[in-house]
Amino acid sequence: MEIEWKYRVQKLKRILGGENPNTLVAMKKLGDIYRKQYKFKQAERLYRQIAISYKKTLGFKHVTTLYAYLGVVNVLRTQGESLQALKIYEFIHDAINKLVAWDHGLALDSNRIRTSIIYRYGKLDEADNLIRQALQIELHTLGLRDEDTLYDMHILSRILRHLSKFDESEQLLRITLHFFQTLECPFSENSLQSLESLMDVLESQGRYDECRNLAMTMVEQLNTSVGESTRLFCIAFTKLPFAQGIKGTI
């Protein structure tokens, strides 16, 4: 798929130009493929080009442009470059608030990314409050089965774990895991990340047998999937010695 979309982007650039809307949509698709493959630098480079092109053609205060800049912020955050992500976020934050209502998808995405950034800075109470506000909106407008709602529930569960609120964190994770496995598949990226987080919660409470069983489940699911991330497989495998109460790493 990556090769196909690279070829498509090159062809569209040659025929239509780099700032044509069809070219930019194809570039976004290729960037998303890179991101899912954990090729974050390649994704970042494309997302930056897209944001600059939209700013030039549509103007800065346009929903499409601001969505593109959020894509840059998100991929920087994913790489752990929180300071750079925060600088760009602060650059676009006021424009988003002035342009759309608080329950608009752009505003919700912005709030989600802001939560993730301040969470990385250890501002757990503030992050907890922000993500709960977003969840109230999403549960009312999108419902429990929506991917964005489930993703924010997952974020909240991670914050709660760091606040040592293990029971609430576990409850949320079991809900998100159930729906991701039902709506997507047992070895989708979202399912596996929820499973990984649930293992972390169990391990934090010393529930090693349960953690071991979940780790084995993750390994079995990854063995049956095609093209799944090596990183996630390693996470599952390195959980096993800890789940068995064995110190050290594989």
Image (cartoon, rainbow, N blue to C red):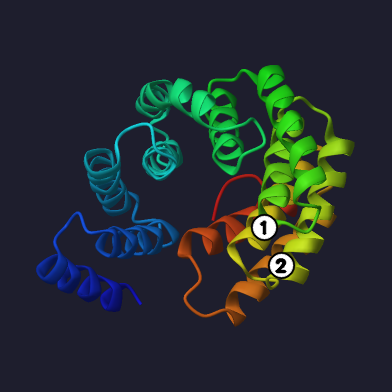
Please provide percent x and percent y for residue 221: 66, 74
Residues at discs 2 and 1 in contact (Cβ within 8 Å): yes
Q: Which residue is mark 2?
A: 216
Going from N to C along the chain, the mark reached first, 2 or 1, is 2
Q: Is residue 241 above or below residue 226?
A: above
Point out which mark residue 240 bears: 1
Indicate the quadrant where residue 73 lies.
top left
Image quarter of residue 137 = top right
- Quarter placement of the C terminus: bottom right
Q: Nearer the viewer, mark 2 or mark 1?
A: 2
11 and 127: which one is in front? 11
Q: Which percent across, then down, holds residue 162? A: 71, 28
Q: Is residue 102 left or right of residue 83?
A: right
Q: Is residue 105 above or below residue 214?
A: above
Front residue of 217 and 64: 64
Q: Residue at x 15, y 66 (%)?
A: 16
Secondary structure category for the residue under label 1: helix
Residue 83 circle label: none
Identify the residue shown where x is 21% and y is 40%. 56
